[in-house]
Amino acid sequence: MAAIPDKIIERLQTCTNFPSPPPVALKVIELAQDPNTDLRLVADTCSGDPAIAAKIMKIANSALYGSRRESTNLRQALIVLGLNATLTLALSFTLVSSLRRDPPKGFDFLGYWRRAILAATWGKLLATELNQPFAEEVFISALLQDIGMLAMDRITPETYKDISPLQLDHGKLAQHEINQVGADHAAIGGWLLDSWNMPDQLVRAVWHSHDIEADDVESERRIYIRIVAMSGQLADAWVSGGDEVTLQRMAVMAEKYLGIIPNRLAEMFQVISEQLPVAAELFEMDLFDDAQLTEITDAAREILMIRNLHALSDAVDLQKKASMLQSENVVLRQETTLDGLTGVGNRRYFEDSLTKEFESAARHKWPLSLIFVDIDYFKEINDSHGHPAGDEILREIAKMVTRTLRSEDIVARYGGDEFVVLLPGSDSEAAGKVAGRLVSQAAGCGASIEGAEILPTLSLGVVTMDGLNNFATPQDLLAAADQALYHSKKAGRNRHTCYDQIKAA
């Protein structure tokens, strides 16, 4: 996140004319972050606001969720949508309701919400098209991606005095905002949502809402960020009337960053035109009339279909070349990034990953945890039972560690009987729990060699880079984990030690 000048943060903290989340929204935020939340609690919360309950019922039966059996009561609607979707949509409705009160003078408030709701509808459709499980989270992220504009208009109204922010390219607008106040609306929006204790994924999506490349975002979060950024671009294209140059640029971006080909994007314009009236009704706002919907849809289909036909002849040749290159790249990747014995990452892959994650964590002030794993008495296993037995133990440990981790975590064989685990975004408490599970599950990685049962144990060192522990380099972080590992061995093995424990001793 770009730095925000202290004077702007002070204005945000003391601003009295910018709405804060209503009680229902605060309760929804609390429920969304509680892993023990159940259907009853969500139903009770939504029932407390009849308007929200009615909207949840309506959206469960709407075109946004396809043709399903009609829900006749709130409980059925919650089952159709699921806990996560219900919480996210309820939060969307309550926040929009509060933010629409007391609109600012001079700012195109209707235009702002028209674009926001259009972007949210596009975001959900894009996520659904790509079979992503976070369509509702994208919906609210896209809806609130420009909330910083509303905040900036309240605390520094002179910023937009001589311009129409919704008519400017977002790159130029961001530069104008930085020139005026030292921060753009994406940074201010991210700060605002963070101060409201919004989920981390939502906050970061707003921070990066103009960064469709998302190169410095962790790979597992990149598709989420790109969908939100693309939703804003498509909303702008729609609002501007969809001229040929703009639509062709959208086609290039959608294919490059999301893998959506032009003719499919054209079909999605038709889907959006069918979903927008539903969204307009849900948010009680006039968006586009039928003539506007038909005009932009027809233009998009014609322009994008023509572009796709022109690309077909080149695609046939490129597909053959791409297929050959893909096969070669798979072999090359396995040789350069994977450990041949265990199938997890190799040392080179780990060192590259550590450097990238360290830089990203340092830049954005996110926690980064590292676990050094060592198999106890591994030399004795090799000496007593032979290297084939040792190799089998290594493979079983690698499988167990991989099963225990999240998909976004990184595991690699560092060398010999040592493994390293990288946990992006995990704090010390979460890392300690992971380490504890690894120690307890090691016994299940045994092997029977010529009648002899081998039951390995593990020694682990855990370290977290966060507000309490700052490290100058990735190597310093790794050295701290190694120091904690040494402490585990010295204390008797078959355990994990956190760096904080030995640092405080």
Image (cartoon, rainbow, N blue to C red):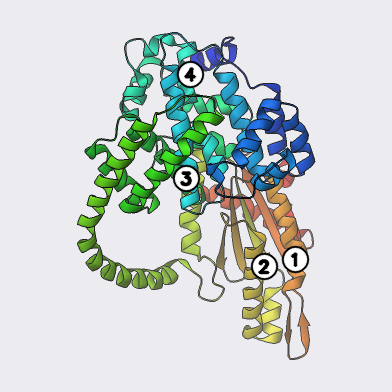
Binning the other alpha carbons within 10 Å of mark 4 as few (below 14), some (14 to 19) or many (20 upward) gives many
Kind of residue indicated by mark 3: Leu
Q: Which residue is mark 3?
A: 125
| Residue type (three-letter) at the residue carrying disc 4 | Leu
**Which of the two discs, 4 and 1, sits closer to the camera?**
4
- Which residue is labeled 1 in the image? 441
Labelled pair 2, 1 in contact (Cβ < 8 Å):
yes
Task: Decide if residue 261 is on the left or right side of residue 505.
Answer: left
Question: Which is more toward the observer, 159 or 120?
Answer: 120
Neighbours of disc 2 within 10 Å: few (<14), some (14-19), many (20+): some
Q: Position of residue 68 (x, y in %)?
A: 61, 50
Q: For residue 272, what is the image quadrant? A: top left
In the displayed structure, 118 sits above or below 351; it is above
**Cα distance in 3D space between marks 2 and 1:** 8 Å
Mark 1 Cα shell of 10 Å, populated few (<14), some (14-19), many (≥20): some
Whether residues under marks 3 and 1 lie with C-beta atoms below 8 angstroms apart, the answer is no
Q: Earlier in the sequence, mark 2 or mark 4?
A: 4
Q: Amino acid at mark 2?
A: Met
Identified by mark 1, the residue type is Gln
